[in-house]
Image (cartoon, rainbow, N blue to C red):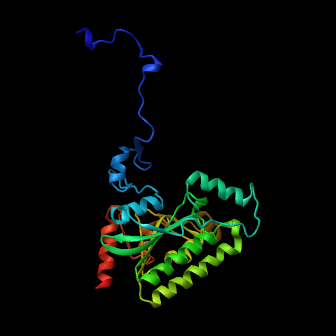
Amino acid sequence: MSWFTRKDKGIQTPTEFKREAPDGLWYQCPSCKKALHTREHRLFAFTCSSCNYHEKIGSQEYFELLFDQSRYTELDPMLSSGDPLNFTDTKKYTDRVVATEHKTGLKDAVRAAYGDMNGMPITIAAMDFSFIGGSMGSVVGEKISRAIDHSLKTGTPFLMISRSGGARMMEAGFSLMQMAKTSARLALLAEAKIPYISLLTDPTTGGVTASFAMLGDFNIAEPGALIGFAGPRVIKETIGKDLPKGFQSADFVLDHGFLDFIVDRKDMKDKLSALLGMLKN
């Protein structure tokens, strides 16, 4: 029958009548390449429904996932970086910060907030890798320290969500001082017997790993997260040996005793609430 037979070769639709899917309607998993509707991807807590790949997300998404009804009060939202060293590489540090603020809508690489999680009060600090690689500068250390102070003042558990490339080179020694600063604040939290949970996400490296990210009463991670101090290439060149398969993955770090458990993002809110409930009792 003629309606099953193409009479003309090629597609004859004029350009102005062609229809294309709107940008942002679909998400393609970088691991299994499956295409998902963005609504489905968000429903699965930004994980792939096929292979469970955990997409990298920022502080806003974590706050919406963990706080009840996505309601929270942000701490020190306007705190931003200075330029203590008058640093310049390919551009001035101040110009880089301003450009990143405009691009991301963030003031620095960490945000802190408090609210309820399944009815339990909690203070959360979450890092944003999109702000200069989640690097740890003086503002990052200050905001985390102030968030810990809020936990001390209110007696609420503290959750730190780390995602970072390490220290911020533009602040040199000022950046490295944040390791001691945050660690000292966490010692006060331990003395007050207030729970501290450290969640390591992909990637957590450098000075962040060497300080507050590994000092939790419970150190947990998302599946597939890269966790380490120096990168695999640097380590291999230093020790002159090939590294084990899966080196610095969350599973490898768990097997070698540096993590307490790995938690799927879809179950995170309930698992954290259950854990804090047991500590409370």
Q: Is 64 located above or below residue 197 in the figure?
A: above
Q: Quadrant of residue 167?
A: bottom right
* Furthest residue toward bottom: 191
Q: Position of residue 178 (x, y in %)?
A: 61, 76
The residue located at (40%, 40%) in the rendering is: 25
* Residue 162 appears anywhere in the view: no
| Residue toward you, 234 or 185 | 185
Rendering quarter of residue 9: top left
Q: Position of residue 165 (x, y in %)?
A: 58, 64
Q: Residue 265 or 260: which is nearer the viewer?
A: 265
**Eyeballing the image, is 218 above or below 168?**
below
Query: Total marks drawn?
Result: 0
Percent of width and height locating residue 54: 41, 57
* Quadrant into which the C terminus falls: bottom left
Q: If the image is split into quadrants, where does the N terminus sit?
A: top left
Position in image of residue 162 (x %, y %) = 50, 68
To which quarter of the image does residue 196 belong?
bottom left
Above or below, comparing residue 183 to residue 109 in the picture: below
The answer to which of 29 and 150 lies nearer the viewer is 150
Residue in view at x 58 percent, y 61 percent: 107
Q: Is residue 97 left or right of residue 12?
A: right
Q: Is residue 132 left or right of residue 244?
A: right
| Residue 85, placed above or below residue 95 | below
Can you see residue 176?
Answer: yes
Residue at 55% across, 82% down: 183
